[in-house]
Amino acid sequence: MKPPAAISKLAMALCSAPLLVHACHCLPTLRPDGRPYQPPLTIKIPEKRPGAAIFVGTVESIYPKNEDFPQIWKTLFGKMPSEGEEPPLEHLRRFILHVYGGMLTPPIRERIAKAASVDEIHQVNIIARWLGPRRIIFRVTEAFSETTIGSFTLYTGSGGGDCGIDFRKGQRWLVDAYKDDAGNWIAHTCSATAPASQSKLAIAHLRTH
């Protein structure tokens, strides 16, 4: 069963929702047929600059996994809402606290707790500009700027038009990340982040410059 659009608006990842709350600013949000636009990765050479973490690494873990959202919802509430039905405010609130509790700062937790409507919850940015962020842990194998060999944690969106990158466990990437105002490392499709297999020229350039 296809999950309802309202949950997709919450987490940016459950289905092809007709509207996206925090749309990607560098590319169109919707296709001509109304479906979300999944931006293609643009292969370019990351610029070594202060505050940028540039490295090659392998994805070790992803949380939360987009494909787990429907089962989490059903575990919490018994069943998915009907197609087109907006879940109750308290369900959305509980879902966010359950899935993202470990990522919430006290001020964000308070905003979610005090939200008086679904729309107010949709305006919350848990990490950077995302209501539905994903935490990606890399094993860095080659460092070019602002990081060292070892573990590296960054955040991205859930995809489906919010600039989130579709990282998969075990994949090797050239990463171009920056810090948000809260000090979290961020990567998105508008950056030079790209699969390492498609970035051989960029990696060769970084090694010699």
Image: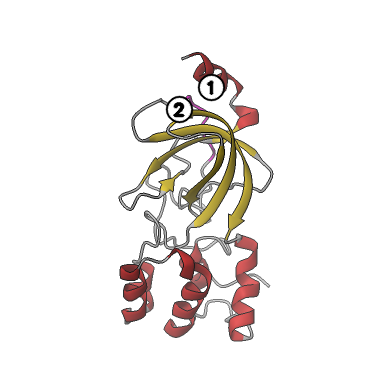
Q: Nearer the viewer, residue 84 or 161?
A: 161
Which of the 4 image quadrants contains residue 51?
A: top left
Amino acid type, callout 1: Ala
Q: Position of residue 73 (x, y in %)?
A: 59, 77
Q: Indicate yes or no whether the magenta region holds residue 44.
A: yes
Q: Is residue 129 visible?
A: yes
For the magenta stretch, what is the residue range?
40-45
Any mark on residue 46, and which? Answer: 2
Which of the 4 image quadrants contains residue 140?
A: top right
Q: Is residue 86 visible?
A: no
Q: Most prominent secondary structure in the magenta stretch?
A: loop
Amino acid type, callout 2: Pro
Q: Which residue is mark 1?
A: 202
The reply to whether callout 1 and callout 2 are in contact (CB within 8 Å) is: yes
| Image-based side of 161 in relation to 61, left or right | left
Any mark on residue 191, and which? Answer: none
